[in-house]
């Protein structure tokens, strides 16, 4: 099957000034698009051609097919982890699970901020639901994704430099802080936690 760049769930300028239109033109329009294009080229004539995206991520060994498929899936998940006028705090059952693990939403925010800032090099910081129903923060490098683990992804932060360099230059801590305060999509995470 031919993989497509999904629609962004908001306008390119809808997250400004926190995440600029220019960042999204590159990050969505060029980086995410390139992963889609690369994946389509790599799977031509292979066993992966007939599989959907999640099946490819789960099946492909380390290498180009895996990297591009996982990056396509991760970026789509990341766009859904963002929303205009987001931030604030999670609610409902997710908030209860967060309180149980970290004591409070504020302590959780400190923990995910520290994890994302400390995720060395290019990668992803995930809030996940574990098989026992508890929540945790997982750092992954490169194209790492919870899809290949027993955990369920709830929300993610892309900490590749291309996610923040135009707006924040080298200041990843400021980018993560702004993600949490202004654009995190907690209703998406709550839905994933419930599902
Ligand atoms: Mn990215």
Image (spheres, helix red, strand yellow):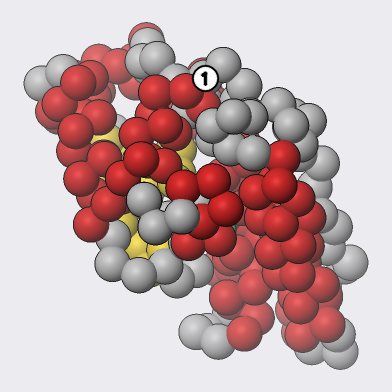
| Residue depicted at x 36% and y 51% | 171
Residue 27 makes an appearance in the image: yes
- Residue 148 vertical placement versus 152 (above, below): below
Residue 55 makes an appearance in the image: no
| Residue depicted at x 74% and y 32% | 13
- Residue 86 vertical placement versus 64 (above, below): above
Left or right, residue 8 beside residue 76: right
Name the residue that disc number 1 marks.
Answer: 86
Horizontal and vertical percent for residue 134? 24, 34
Horizontal and vertical percent for residue 143? 50, 68
Camera-nearest residue between 127 and 11 = 11
- Residue 153 vertical placement versus 120 (above, below): above
Left or right, residue 151 beside residue 99: right
How many numbered dots are placed on residues in this image?
Answer: 1
Going by the picture, which residue comes out furthest to the top? 92
Going by the picture, which residue comes out furthest to the left? 103
Horizontal and vertical percent for residue 146? 43, 56
Left or right, residue 76 beside residue 139: right
Q: In which of the image's four quarters is ligand 1 placed?
A: bottom right
Q: Quadrant of residue 39?
A: bottom right
Q: Quadrant of residue 88?
A: top left
| Residue depicted at x 59% and y 77% | 66
């Amino acid at each position: 099957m031919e993989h497509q760049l999904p629609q962004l769930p908001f306008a390119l300028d809808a997250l400004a000034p926190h995440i600029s239109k220019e960042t999204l033109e590159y990050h969505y329009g060029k980086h995410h698009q390139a992963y889609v294009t690369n994946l389509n080229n790599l799977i031509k004539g292979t066993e992966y051609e007939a599989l959907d995206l999640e099946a490819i991520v789960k099946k492909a060994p380390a290498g180009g097919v895996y990297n591009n498929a996982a990056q396509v899936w991760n970026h789509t998940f990341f766009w859904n982890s963002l929303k205009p006028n987001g931030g604030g705090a999670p609610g409902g059952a997710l908030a209860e699970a967060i309180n149980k693990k970290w004591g409070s939403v504020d302590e959780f925010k400190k923990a995910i901020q520290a994890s994302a800032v400390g995720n060395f090099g290019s990668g992803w910081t995930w809030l996940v639901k574990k098989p026992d129903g508890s929540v945790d923060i997982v750092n992954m490098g490169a194209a790492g994704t919870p899809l290949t683990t027993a955990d369920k992804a709830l929300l993610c932060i892309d900490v590749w430099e291309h996610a923040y360099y135009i707006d924040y230059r080298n200041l990843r801590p400021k980018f993560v802080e702004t993600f949490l305060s202004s654009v995190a999509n907690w209703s998406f995470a709550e839905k994933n936690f419930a599902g």
